[in-house]
Image: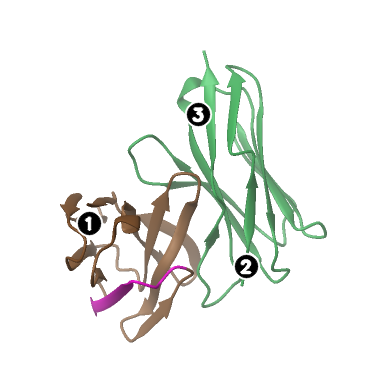
């Protein structure tokens, strides 16, 4: 079945380290998203991309960067991780005609 | 930008009772309103959505209502079952090149 996958699924790192979270999809969707989930705060949008040449900041982009390497791949980087970036990170995809989001399984990131 | 508020943050009901979760949105141009269910340790998944040209939509025990004038929409679950226990998120977006804005989530607990 077509799916959205994320690697790694869990990561523990130290303050100041550079971290990359990767997302791949076999759904053939043009649109891809990165969200952060914290208890009581819902899903907050970090960055989104509507096609390979289109990158947009979401509501909480500070401290993060992204790269859209291909239609199927969208990576999120933390250049210098800090403890308040400890969270569950979700990648998602959607089609232009229908904004239904298909989420990956999530990456649990802990910054010590 | 869009702002979505969701209430309550937690909801406990007895099995067989109904549950109602409410969301308000700020952008009068928003026209797409999905609801996602996230079971413990899993990814969010779409359960129902509604567009602004419709006032109500039903799918078995789940229904969503939309009041465009008041800018609020609600999720109604009837005859609740223990497997309905999860976190529910509402969201809103405009048509076109717009990302979803999510509410902060409601943790529903159905007591057997």
Q: Dot 3 falls on which chain?
A: B
Determine if marks 1 and 2 fall on one subunit.
Answer: no
Classify mark 1: helix, strand or loop: strand
**Picture quadrant where residue A104 is located:** bottom left
Crowdedness near tag 1: few (<14), some (14–19) or many (≥20) residues, C-alpha within 10 Å: many
Whether residue A70 is visible: no
Q: Toward which corner of the image does residue A81 lie, by quadrant?
A: bottom left
**Chain for disc number 2:** B
**Where does the image place residue A22, in percent across and percent down from the top left?**
21, 64
Q: Mark 3 = which residue? A: B84
Q: Are marks 3 and 1 on the same chain?
A: no
Could you tell me which secondary element the residue under label 3 belongs to?
A: helix
Query: Where is residue A77 drawn, in percent x and y?
Result: 24, 70
Residue at 70%, 50% in the rendered image? B73
Question: Which chain is disc 1 placed on?
Answer: A
Q: Colour of chain A?
A: brown
Q: Is residue B38 above or below residue B14?
A: below
Any idea which chain is the green one in this picture? B
What span is colored magenta in the figure? A60-70
Chief secondary structure of the magenta portion: strand
- Would you say A111 lies left or right of A62 here? left
Q: What whole-number distance in Å separates the C-alpha atoms at marks 2 and 3?
A: 28 Å
Q: For the residues labelled 2 and 3, say whether their Cβ atoms are less than 8 Å apart.
A: no
**Disc 3 to disc 1: CB gap under 8 Å:** no
Is residue B90 something one can see in this rendering? yes
**Residue beneath disc 1:** A6
């Amino acid at each position: 079945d077509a799916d959205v996958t994320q690697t790694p699924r869990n990561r523990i790192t130290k303050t100041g380290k550079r971290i990359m979270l990767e997302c791949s999809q076999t759904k053939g969707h043009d649109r891809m998203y990165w969200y952060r989930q914290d208890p009581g705060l819902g899903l907050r949008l970090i960055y989104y991309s509507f096609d390979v040449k289109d990158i947009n900041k979401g509501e909480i982009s500070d401290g993060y960067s992204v790269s859209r390497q291909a239609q199927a791949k969208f990576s999120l980087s933390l250049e210098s991780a800090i403890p308040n970036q400890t969270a569950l990170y979700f990648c998602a995809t959607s089609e232009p005609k229908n904004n239904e989001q298909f989420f990956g399984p999530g990456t649990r990131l802990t910054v010590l | 930008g869009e702002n979505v508020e969701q209430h309550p943050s937690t909801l406990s009901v007895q099995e067989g009772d109904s549950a109602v979760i409410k969301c308000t949105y700020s952008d009068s141009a928003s026209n797409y309103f999905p609801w996602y269910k996230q079971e413990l340790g899993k990814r969010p998944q779409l359960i129902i959505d509604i567009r602004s040209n419709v006032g109500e939509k039903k799918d078995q025990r789940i229904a969503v209502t939309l009041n465009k004038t008041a800018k609020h929409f609600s999720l109604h679950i009837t005859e609740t079952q223990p497997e309905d226990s999860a976190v529910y998120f509402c969201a809103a977006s405009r048509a076109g090149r717009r990302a979803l804005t999510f509410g902060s989530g409601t943790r529903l607990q159905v007591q057997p």
